[in-house]
Image (cartoon, grey):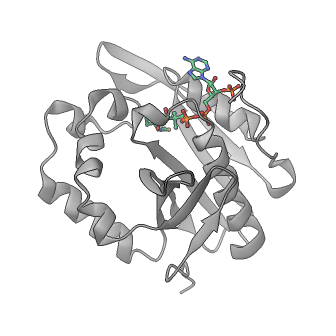
Amino acid sequence: MKHFNKIGLRLEGERTCLVSFSEAHRDDPAYLNWLRNPDVVRTLYLPDYLAGPVPYEDVKTYCDRMIRSETDLFLALIDKTDDRFVGTLKAGHTNWYAGVSDIGIMVGDKDTWGKGFAQDAIFTLCHYLFQTVGLRKLTSGAMSINPAMIKVFEKLGFQREALLRAQDRTEDGYCDHVHFGCFPDELRTPTPLANGQ
Ligand SMILES: CC(C)(COP(=O)(O)OP(=O)(O)OC[C@H]1O[C@@H](n2cnc3c(N)ncnc32)[C@H](O)[C@@H]1OP(=O)(O)O)[C@@H](O)C(=O)NCCC(=O)NCCS
């Protein structure tokens, strides 16, 4: 079966670089803190993580499965200015037969939100998946309460393909889920941020 080539993988963006997620990232205390921060996990549709502090063992089980997976490419997101680990990215549930994979991101360090890291990292990953891995289509989704994520996908050329009404649970009710898709000729390079950074 086809699989991702994860050994020594390092993808260079303008502001960020992406490296294979390792046991060292899994055991970095910052990573567990992000997964225990309600501001970070509220838009990740992980209700168990919102119920209380997620146990390290659960995180370890998830990470170890992702590291070994042949259909998931799990990456650590690194700030190029100081080489700091600031989040994670994945191409998940890859269907090698159809050439489709689903993109997800968590910029865990809130101090780095709004600096263009998501745009830069998602573009870098998508470019690699199309040009080097040879995938045909990339998909993703975002809760409608996550305007930053929706804006990033739209700026990069992802198209809205579906709106799943009242699909996701929130702290105080339900919200819609926006489903995106992108083909290679639709992907656009990141443009300057509205805040000028
Ligand atoms: C959503 C998330 C990935 C965005 O990452 P980021 O690095 O801050 O994103 P960027 O800086 O690249 O871009 C954010 C864009 O959204 C805009 N934005 C931010 N907050 C916004 C808001 N409340 N309403 C509208 N736009 C907003 C920014 O201005 C920027 O647009 P610009 O380029 O036109 O200036 C990050 O906040 C995160 O990881 N959140 C927690 C986990 C999560 O939600 N993951 C996604 C699950 S689908």
Q: Quadrant of residue 140?
A: top right
Image-based side of 149 in relation to 111, left or right = right
Residue placed at 29% from the left, 68% from the top? Answer: 24
| Residue furthest front as drawn | 82
Could you tell me residue 177's position as x and y percent?
Answer: 52, 29
Please state which of residues 88 and 173 is positioned toward the viewer in this rendering: 88
Image-based side of 139 in relation to 159, left or right = left
Could you tell me residue 8's position as x and y percent?
Answer: 51, 81
Please state which of residues 187 and 124 is positioned toward the viewer in this rendering: 124
Residue placed at 45% from the left, 19% from the top? Answer: 175
Q: Quadrant of residue 110?
A: top left
Q: In which quarter of the image is ligand 1?
A: top right
Against 17, residue 121 (above or below) is above
- Looking at the rendered image, the quarter that the C terminus falls into is top right
| Residue furthest top as drawn | 172
Residue placed at 21% from the left, 63% from the top? Answer: 60
Image-based side of 138 in relation to 188, left or right = left
Residue placed at 80% from the left, 49% from the top? Answer: 187
* Number of numbered discs on residues: 0
Could you tell me residue 53's position as x and y percent?
Answer: 14, 38
| Residue furthest bottom as drawn | 1
Could you tell me residue 30's position as x and y percent?
Answer: 28, 48
